[in-house]
Amino acid sequence: MDDAIRCPIRRTLAHLPWVGDDRAGARHWLAMQRDPLAWLQKVHAEQPDMAVTRMGLSRLWCLFHPRAVQELMVDHREHLKRWEPSLCMMRQWNGRSFMMREGEPARERRKEVRPHIAAPAPAEILRLAERWGEGIEDGAERDLDLEMAAYSVTLTGRALFGIDLENDAFRVARAVRLLSRVALLETSTGIPLGHWFPSKLCPRKRWALTQLQEVVGRCADESLRPLAVHRDELATLLMAGHQSTGATLTWVQLLLAQHPAVREALRGELKGVDWSRVQGMADLRQCPLLRAVIQESLRLYPPAYGLVPRQLTADVEVFGQGLKKGDIVMLSSWITHRDPRWFEAPLEFRPQRFIEPSSWPKGAYFPFGLGDRACPGTAMAMMDLAVSLAWWVEHWDVEPLGPVEPQGWFSLRPRRARVRFVRRG
């Protein structure tokens, strides 16, 4: 095998930053907690295909090469389970939902849930967007991330539960944003923030969990949908259902603000769309740029930028390397999506790359995950994004009030996304 592709453990350990005099991986985890995006980039710069360090008594593998990603998540999917510390953290708000299950029980529960995960009709999405836009004054300065997250809560409430969550939207969005920060801290330390933990985040975490429990309880009481009988599923879908949509709407509008020519081309494409005839993404074939803009935004800023660590339940071989039972593995779409080996000019916003035939290998693009653990709400998210983005682009310009940087909490969010909303026409 070519030396450029092989990744011997000794060579990896010798070249990884800090590993060698940091046998427990403590410095790695401190760096990950402080700035996970910078940590991932540093590890990738040292070992661009796959790297290994330690997490306590276990080895932690970071897989970046598409072939390694594909082999792990597809070929060896039967030998993976969620890492228990991250599961304990997520159970605090996801309970025993399908996301928390493994193996056959997880697949069976996903089959039960998937038929109930569908986007509202485009006319309903447009109505919700128009109603939301009525609450924004021309020239208003807002936190775009919070605004789009709250708007997406209303979409999720209508799509999955058939109820109006407009009055609860901002408190849900604020609660989930806080829990995203808490989740990073708890995952990186393996310690849940309890009453005893000396941190100002503890009372705020309790507040956030209380808000979610209250809203989920109301959804369960008022909704007539089949999912309403499963409160754990409600909590999971409410959180996951709006996070990806809200974050992507934020990033794509920031990108379009930086690329006005693409924004104007998109507006031109959308002029001929009859939304009354649109039932799904297949009906938007006449809008290739709309889909491409969303896909390119997801490439640059995938909400699930670092998939939850998984643990191997058997010895496997990945990318020519022997991984042992008990080893922990981590993937990062943030890194793989930005590798110049797979995407030309990877840091540039080029929607055209998704209109032309793709040239990247399998495993190079996975904004919604891969294999059995791929997001079951991908079709719903894409439909929500397409129709919502069409409305926001048609009616509003977004003007950033300062530089915006990505923040790697549990999901990828912008830091200080203050913007001015300017009404068009």
Image (spheres, rainbow, N blue to C red):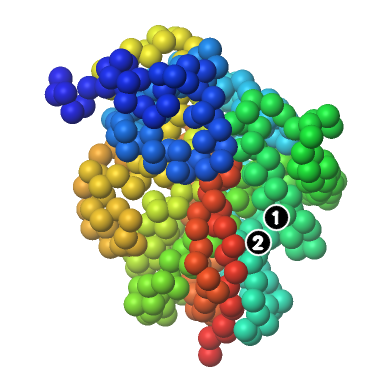
Q: Are there few (<14), some (14-19), or many (20+) residues within 10 Å of tag 1?
A: many
Residue hosting label 1: 173
- Circle 1 sits in a helix, a strand or a loop, which is it? helix
Percent from the top left, x then y, of residue 54? Answer: 47, 19
Residue 229 visible in the snapshot: no
- Residue 213: name its quadrant: top right
> Residue flagged by tag 1: what amino acid is it?
Ala
Q: Is residue 46 left or right of residue 183?
A: left
In the rendered image, the vertical position of residue 29 relative to residue 367, given as above or below: above
- Residue 157: name its quadrant: bottom right
Q: Looking at this view, is 20 or 101 the one in front?
A: 20
Cα gap from disc 2 to disc 1, whole angstroms: 7 Å
Q: Looking at this view, is 180 or 58 the one in front?
A: 58
Q: Is residue 28 left or right of residue 16?
A: right
Q: Residue at x 23, y 43 (%)?
A: 341
- Circle 2 sits in a helix, a strand or a loop, which is it? helix
Percent from the top left, x then y, of residue 404? Answer: 51, 63
Q: Are there few (<14), some (14-19), or many (20+) residues within 10 Å of tag 2?
A: many
Mark 2 and mark 1 residues within 8 Å of each other at the beta carbon: yes
Q: Split into 4 quadrants, where in the image is the N terminus?
A: top left
Query: Total of numbered circles in the picture?
Result: 2
Residue hosting label 2: 146
Percent from the top left, x then y, of residue 355? Answer: 28, 60
Q: Looking at this view, is 370 or 49 the one in front?
A: 49
> Residue flagged by tag 2: what amino acid is it?
Leu
